[in-house]
Amino acid sequence: MACGGPLPERCLLLQSLYTRILALAASPRAEGGLVLVSFAESSFFPIPPDVLLIPMILARPERAWRLAAICTVASVTGGAWGWLIGFALFDQLAQPVLAMYGYGEKFVAFQQSYQEWGLWIILIKGLTPIPYKIVAIASGAAHFDFMTFVLASVATRGARFFMVAALLHFFGVPIRDFIETRLMLVTTMVVLGIVGGFVALRYLH
């Protein structure tokens, strides 16, 4: 696992967390761990649920859809918590989280673009590995409509996790490396398809 942190001790901590989470995939507590990681990653945790989701589906392909659904529900619930942090606890909790990920100075500019493109940002970034937690916090800080945020998150996070589940369910181990190294490419293509669909609907009617 690559570490983007500037300090060696931070890298070691992330590597240790990654190893511990990966070990959960083979334990009887795997589904509970998947819920916790999916929830936490959407508001503050640095490790994505794919670390658990991928080996769990490979071990039990028949449970792919159930595991994707668990990821989706837990992730959107965590996103709702991130929205609340941005809405009500920005100074106390949101700013430290943003600073931890290096978004502190960029957040003002991000908020300005968010005011104009809020729904599109949720739709696009909810599908990609770009930190969904940042979008969730920004949504709350911008007082973006909560129900719109939740519905958009269900659509995009669900699409992301069910796409991973479908690839693993039908292609198994051979597709694993492709998912881990090319997930951004796949999700970008999905995003382009969604945006293209909206544009077509707008100009064809």
Image (tube, rainbow, N blue to C red):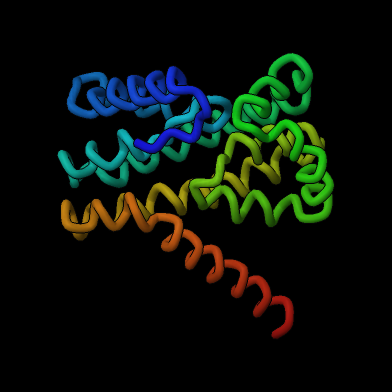
Q: Residue at x 57, y 40 (%)?
A: 132
Q: Nearer the viewer, residue 203 or 135?
A: 135
Q: Residue at x 71, y 52 (%)?
A: 119
Residue 71 spot, x, y in % from top left:
41, 37
Residue 191 spot, x, y in % from top left:
54, 63
**Dividing the picture into quarters, in which one does residue 90 lie?**
top right
The mark tally for this picture is 0
Image quarter where the C terminus lies is bottom right
Image quarter where the N terminus lies is top left
* Most distant residue in the bottom direction: 204
Q: Is residue 12 above or below residue 64?
A: above
* Most distant residue in the top direction: 92
Q: Is residue 37 above or below residue 197?
A: above
Q: Is residue 3 left or right of residue 175?
A: right
Residue 117 spot, x, y in % from top left:
77, 55
Q: Nearer the viewer, residue 6 or 19?
A: 6
Q: Is residue 12 left or right of residue 142?
A: left
Q: Is residue 118 left or right of residue 177?
A: right
Q: Residue at x 67, y 43 (%)?
A: 149
Residue 31 spot, x, y in % from top left:
30, 27
Q: Residue at x 15, y 39 (%)?
A: 59
